[in-house]
Structure formats: structure tokens, C-alpha cells
Image (tube, helix red, strand yellow):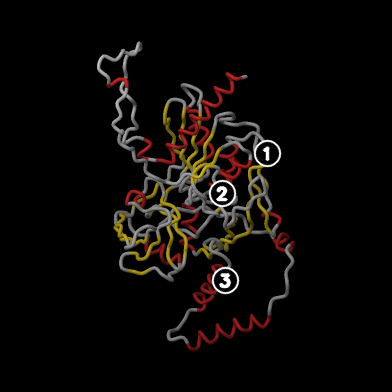
Amino acid sequence: MKFFSRTPLTTALLGCVLGLSTPIQAQEEAAVETKPLPLAELRMFADVFDRIKQAYVEPVDDRELLEDAIRGMLTGLDPHSAYLEPEAFESLQIHTSGEFGGLGIEVGLEDGFIKVIAPIDDTPAQRAGVKAGDLIMRLDDTPVQGMDLSEAIDLMRGEVGTPIRLTIMREGRDQPLELEIVRDVIKVRSVRHELLEPGYGYLRVSQFQSHTGEDLVEAIAEMQQDEALKGLVLDLRNNPGGVLQAAVAVSDAFLDEGTIVYTEGRLPNSELRFNASADTAAPDTPLVVLINGGSASASEIVAGALQDHQRALVMGTDSFGKGSVQTVLPLGQERAIKLTTARYFTPGGRSIQAQGIKPDLHVDEAKLTLLAEDGRIKERDLAGHLENAAGEAAPEALPSDGLSARDFQLFEALNLLKAMQILQRTSAVSE
């Protein structure tokens, strides 16, 4: 099974959007053209190894030195390839179950600092106010600049109930912001749903896990129990990705034919193509997909597939742009390497790598401020005005604590679905 991932993560953070795979077979390795090993560079490596052993200020264990060399060899490839020691390998497998301990954020490296890609829904980090795009400067009193990502993760991990202080820089602020977060067991509920209004459903996918596709289909069925849905919002904002098969299943719930995603790489087993089945959970329901800069990997697969097939309108801001595939190759029972083995492409042949999905309708995260009435006199204000035959009603106003104030992008998505319903009705009348 293959997964998509953005960063090497352990149990402190969200995670793991990558996956486990069986080792690459010898015949597949043979299919890739290889060149003779560079003897001069190998001699240089042996010479450096020997000089460290002899001259370093403290004795160095051979095994540790070789593992450091492996680690450096992989991290030098790209930001997503990594050497997984026993603890990290075990944590990676825990992430796919949807429950782990820590803060509830996914991170990456940027300019030597730890960058927050996305906080997980309903976790200590989100409740403390951590936002996508934050740069972590310090963990308690320890600066993180230049620190290896795994070292930072180790500092963020700890016993449940213990606090940690994050010093972060946030766009739009001149001074660092300090947030104290209490570590907890992170239980990720992959799919949440509700009716925003009668007939208009909301699906929030926070992470793609093994059963996300099944959970989403069940959620749609539950919302359709009383009446058919007039429209659906699929919220993929701040969703860092997850299991590839789950992204395919979610896309398939809305598509009845065609390619969903395909991958290309150097090895035969890295070239895959996934197609939609005829069965759909909501074949004709108007659909709006919400994305932002925290939407990555598997989220971009879903948004790209639905956009290319013109099955949904994509709304929000540009996605993260993670378009490569990582395969976890076990090394014995306790260790593994996470290696970038392919790129993925949308049905229309677009590569998302470093580009992201561009929404059909760009809507920034914002707050809606209602303007005061201009004070003009209206008919109902005139003395002795005629009563309305149906009775007078007070003019409606947007509630200050409603959806428009709480989530402007979602409010706009709901408005778009309503507009689509009106257009359908007017088209039917004109015919």
C-alpha cells in the first residue's frame, strides 16, 4: 500500500501521510539502469570515516556513524525522504490508525525553521491558536533554527498532560507570539458532517485514513435520510493528506467514470493509475470543494480530480503543492527508509508538485463586517402606510455569531450552492 506524505513525522505531530510498502523486488531494481559505483567517492567516504574515528574529540561508535551517513544521504535528496529509526518507524504505523500522542500539528522545514503546515481539528494545537503557516522559533527555551526535524519532533513529544511553550512568528505580526500547549493523546476523526441548512450538507475531511472513504459515504447517506441533498460542501482545508487509497475512494464517491489520479516513476511498481467506478454516493448533487494552503497531497488529488472532471467547483486559496509519492521500505523489523519514488498527476495530466491546485473561485479567509443602516426612511416608516396583505415581517439580518462570522469561506460556499439551485430552477422554467 502506498501513501502520500509531505514531511517525516512521528507521534508528536499529525501525520503521517505516507505509507508502508513491501520492499522493492530485485527484478524491479534490475529494471533501472545502474552505473558502476564511483570508486573515488567511495574511497573519500572511507577516508572521512577513518579520520573521524581517529581525530574526533570523542570516541564515535561505528554503528552510529554509519547511521548518520545514511540519514544524511536520504535527507540530502529532498525534504520528504528520510531514514526511519525504530521509534519513528513505529510512530509512522501508529499514525495510520488515527490515534497518537502529542500536539496535533503537521510540520515541515523552511529556511531552517519548523513551519506549521496544518493543525489537526480538535487537538491541543488548534485550540491553542496554532495556524497554518506559523514558523516555530523556539520550543520552550530551545531555538530550533538549523535543528533536524526529527530532533524538533522529539522535543515536542512528551508525556500526556505536560506543557510545552511554542514561540512562533506569524505573518502580519511584528513580534513573536508565545503559545503554551498541553500535550494530549490525539484522536483524529477523519470525517465529520452536518446540515448547514435543510438540504445543504457539509463534509469535513481532516485527514485521509484507511476508512475515510467508507465513513464519507455513510455520512452522505445519513444526511440524505430525510430529504435529497440540494448541495454539498467538501471541506479539505488544512488537510495534510493521508492514505492514497482513501483519496481515491473519496473521489470515487462523486465520480462515475474516468481517471482519478496516476503516478509516474522510474520503477515499474511506481506507475499506477486509479479509475472511478460506476457506483457513486452523490452522483448529481452540486458540489463545492474548499481548499487552502494547508491542503496537501491526498487533498490535492481529490480537488484536482473533481476539478478536472468538472464535477465540483473548487473554492478558497491555492493548495500546498505536494505532488510526490513516498514509499516506506522496511530495513529488517525495526528500521525503514522513506523514499520519494514517483510523482502524481491529475486526470488532465497536471503535476501538482510545487504548483498546487488553483481554485476556480479565489476566496480568502476573512471576516464579514456588516455596515450600519444608512438611515434612509422606507415605506414601512411612514405614518399610516398600508399594511402588507401577508403581514409585516422584520427585515432579516445576518447574525453576528452565525456562519458568516464564524467561517466566511464556508458561508460563501453555501451561497454558491444556493445560487446554483436558483440557476437550475430558472433553466428548468425557461425550457
- Tag 3: amino acid: Met
Which corner quadrant holds the C terminus? top right
- Tag 1: amino acid: Gly
Q: Is residue 36 above or below residue 138?
A: below
Q: Is residue 382 above or below residue 196?
A: above
| Residue 246 seen anywhere in this rendered image of the structure | no
Q: CA distance from mark 1 to mark 2?
A: 19 Å
Mark 1 or mark 3: name the one nearer the start of the chain: 3
Q: In which quadrant of the rendered view does residue 143 lie?
A: bottom left
- Residue 402: x, y in percent? 34, 35
- Residue 11: x, y in percent? 43, 56
Q: Helix or strand or loop: what does disc 2 sit on? A: loop
For disc 2, the marked residue is 357
Q: Is residue 75 above or below residue 314?
A: below
Crowd band around label 3 with a 10 angstrom C-alpha radius: few (<14), some (14–19), many (20+): few
Q: In which quadrant of the rendered view does residue 400 lie?
A: top left
Q: Which residue sits furthest left? A: 383
- Residue 282: x, y in percent? 56, 30
For disc 1, the marked residue is 258
Evaluate if marks 1 and 2 touch, with contact meaning CB atoms under 8 Å apart: no
Q: Helix or strand or loop: what does disc 1 sit on? A: loop
- Tag 2: amino acid: Ile
Mark carried by residue 73: 3
Question: Residue at (47%, 64%) from the top-left corner?
Answer: 110
As rendered, which of 378 and 50 lies closer to the eye?
A: 378
Q: Helix or strand or loop: what does disc 3 sit on? A: helix
Q: Is 115 on the left-hand or right-hand side of 428?
A: left
As rendered, which of 329 and 82 lies closer to the eye?
A: 82
Q: Is 31 on the left-hand or right-hand side of 147?
A: right
